[in-house]
């Protein structure tokens, strides 16, 4: 009974969303799969059509941020934790855009995420600003501070 209700509910969702592109009728049924896409049949005009899979599209802002963080020396998993995008996706972006990480042997980046008030408090203390390079980047409603501290010999 549960599976039947789930099937009817899923079919009902399809019926509400889809309409025949030829006659705009809502009386459509599934009619097989062609090239990994669902095929539909309009019962009113007997027209067969397929609907493209939309998939998920990630905003280019996050792609750019992920690649920036990668270039700053953060690992894929660190980027995953910060941005909330899979480390595999970040790895695929690095391959797709042919980004190569420069060799950083004499320093390492550390990062911390602050809200606006915490960032202002951090920047008030001049001792924390000495001896390292840093960059602040916006990350949604928060800010990320990336700091490069040189290794002590």
Image: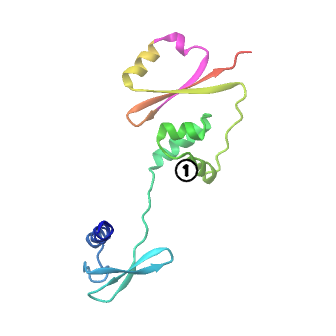
Left or right: 16, with 143 as reference point: left
Spot occupied by residue 98 in the image (x, y as percentages of width and height): 65, 50
Q: Secondary structure at mark 1?
A: helix
Residue drawn at (25%, 70%) of the image: 16
Spot occupied by residue 73 in the image (x, y as percentages of width and height): 62, 34
Spot occupied by residue 45 in the image (x, y as percentages of width and height): 29, 89
Q: Above or below — where is 132 with respect to 10?
A: above
In the rendered image, which residue does mark 1 sit on? Answer: 89
Q: Quadrant of residue 50?
A: bottom left
Q: Nearer the viewer, residue 100 or 74?
A: 74
87 inside magenta stretch? no
Spot occupied by residue 37 in the image (x, y as percentages of width and height): 46, 74
Left or right: 67, with 118 as reference point: right
Work out which residue is located at the far right of the displayed protein and give it: 153
Q: Above or below — where is 25 with respect to 99?
A: below
Q: Nearer the viewer, residue 38 or 20?
A: 38
Left or right: 64, with 17 as reference point: right
Residue drawn at (40%, 20%) of the image: 118
Q: Quadrant of the C terminus?
A: top right
126 inside magenta stretch? yes
- The mark tally for this picture is 1
Q: Which residues are magenta?
A: 125-137
């Amino acid at each position: 009974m549960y599976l039947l209700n789930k099937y009817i509910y899923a079919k009902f969702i399809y019926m509400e969303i889809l309409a025949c592109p030829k006659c705009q009728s809502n009386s459509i049924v599934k009619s097989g799969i062609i090239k990994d896409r669902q095929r539909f049949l309009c019962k009113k005009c007997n027209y067969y059509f397929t609907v493209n899979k939309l998939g998920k599209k990630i905003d280019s802002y996050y792609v750019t941020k992920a690649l920036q963080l990668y270039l700053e020396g953060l690992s894929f998993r660190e980027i995953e934790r910060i941005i909330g995008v899979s480390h595999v996706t970040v790895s695929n972006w690095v391959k797709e855009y042919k980004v190569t990480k420069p060799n950083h042997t004499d320093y390492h980046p550390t990062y911390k995420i602050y809200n606006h008030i915490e960032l202002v408090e951090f920047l008030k203390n001049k001792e924390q600003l000495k001896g390292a390079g840093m960059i602040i980047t916006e990350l949604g409603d928060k800010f990320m501070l990336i700091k490069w501290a040189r290794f002590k010999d």
